[in-house]
Amino acid sequence: MKNKLWLAGIILISFMFMQCQQEESDALPHDHQDHAQDHPKIVSVPTKDVPEMSFPEPEEANSPIIDDKKVNETQQIFPESGRAIGNGKTQAFDYVDFDDPIALNWIPDQAKFTFATSPFYIQAVGSVWFHVKENNGNGYNPDFTSDYGHYHLGYQNFVPIFNWTNQTVWKVINGQPILVQPLLEPRTVSSHYGNQWIKIYAYDYNSSQIPFEFWGIKVINGPIQVWMQKLDGSWSKWSSLGEATWSFDYARHVKQILISGVGSDSYTIDNIKVKKP
């Protein structure tokens, strides 16, 4: 009888210890690699210093569009600007920099685990809205489209730690875990893989697509290829832009921009410098 009671006590203590360990594990943040097998390309690439470079002259290119009539972005959302200053009304340029809290709030789950799904990122610049989305629409040569259903809005200043149980995101500062407020953290855009195509275009209340001035882009992880449709409908491209902050000496008036990687690896971009027409 004593042996049975002793064995029962050992089992009970072991069970209580395992429960305590589980509760402690649930309360603390977990590294995002715990779920790597669920999604092997969870990406959050902190920014880094890159050189400033002037764009070389682009190459002329054949159009990636095969049917203009089918190239129509029907989803239009008009979020307000989440910036107190720095929009198109107060300065000559603006940066579509993936930091606007109202724009982030339109994305499901605020992209707190980095997944940016439809409607993707839409930022107000004065009276114009810039839409940065996966190019998964009709009318394009299939080689210029992708259908991953998301890209990643990684955290610009740190590698996040995800607690999947409590659905929270943490960062470590001076060795201490700090709860992240997803709407208040600067972000960068990372593709799912190198063959994902991202489209940038602008619209307003009166038109589903309007021209805009394109002045530059920051490539954090690259190289990337950039395709640019000019106002006359023709296309130019840069086949390989490496890691740098690229800028023009003068404005390029464009209708849309398509971006993809050069190789198979994910690419990361930020600070798309634009000006409303």
Image: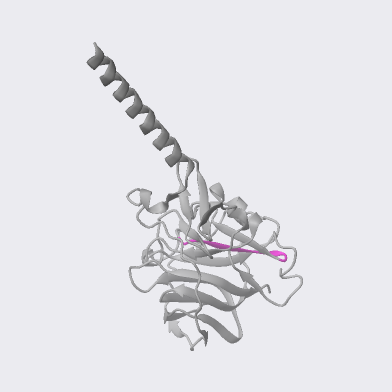
The x, y position of residue 86, in whole percent, is 71, 70
Q: Is residue 14 above or below residue 229?
A: above
Q: Quadrant of residue 64?
A: bottom left
The x, y position of residue 221, in whole percent, is 43, 72
The x, y position of residue 24, in whole percent, is 45, 39
99 and 132: which is toward the camera: 99
Query: Taking 218 as reference, is 64 left or right?
Result: left
Does the magenta segment cover residue 157? Answer: no
The x, y position of residue 272, in whole percent, is 57, 72
Query: Taking 126 as reference, is 202 left or right?
Result: left
Residue 68 visible in this rendered orientation of the protein = no
Q: Which residues are magenta?
A: 126-135
Q: Residue at x 32, y 50 (%)?
A: 37
196 and 76: which is toward the camera: 196
Residue 109 visible in this rendered orientation of the protein = yes
Q: Quadrant of residue 19?
A: top left
10 and 191: which is toward the camera: 10
Query: Taking 121 as reference, is 192 left or right?
Result: left
